[in-house]
Amino acid sequence: MSVVRRPARDSVWLAVAPGVVAVLGLTVNFVAAAAALAGLAIVGVATDRASRRGVTLGSGLIFGALLYAGAQGAPPAVLLLVTAATLVTWTTAQHVVGLAGHLGRDAPVRRSVLVHMGGAMVTTLAAGTLALAVYLFASASLPTSVLVFLLVGSALLLYALEP
């Protein structure tokens, strides 16, 4: 019996779903939305083909679109929501690729993917809410570079979480 080392289609759709939120959040800027949509397409194809590098590349493109939107003046709340959605998409897609490599296409992994995605959502939204509260509280006394440092910190967190 051979094992197909690619994820099931429903797992791919689950992994890409939070990225749709990121793309919709970036509709505040046409260029950012187009780049994020391209990044999401790359994540979808890479997840389907079980490519960790492709998932990271596509997620990085979404994150680059996020940085562009932030530089163009997108609201901080939108940026933090998009950051959370991007992180959840990236980590869930990586999880799906890992499950496919270990268990194959026919393994029942939907519950594992949903639990992973739920935990990632709760964690990133809690961190995002805390970051937004700190930003709003300190925005009167700190320079706007604080938002840049928050975004760079998110990028470093994304890099540090990569398996």
Image (cartoon, rainbow, N blue to C red):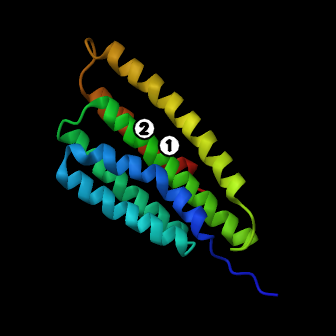
Check if mark 2's residue and mark 1's residue have beta carbons within 8 Å: yes
Classify 51 as above or below 159.
Answer: below
Badge number at residue 147: none
| Rendered residue at 18%/36% (across/down) | 73
Mark 1 residue element: helix
Q: Mark 1 — residue?
A: 157
Picture coordinates of residue 67 (x, y %)?
Answer: 28, 45
Residue 86 vertical position relative to residue 122 in the rendered view, above or below: below
Q: Which residue is at a point 57% across and 54% down the rendered structure image?
A: 92
Which residue carries the number 2 mark? 153
> Is 91 left or right of 107, judged from the image as shown?
left
Q: What residue type is labelled 1?
A: Leu
Where is residue 84? Give x, y as percent: 45, 40
140 and 7: which is toward the camera: 7
Identify the residue shown where x is 24% and y is 52%: 32
Quarter of the image with the N terminus is bottom right
**Image quadrant in which you'd find residue 118:** top right
Label 2 sits on a secondary structure element that is helix
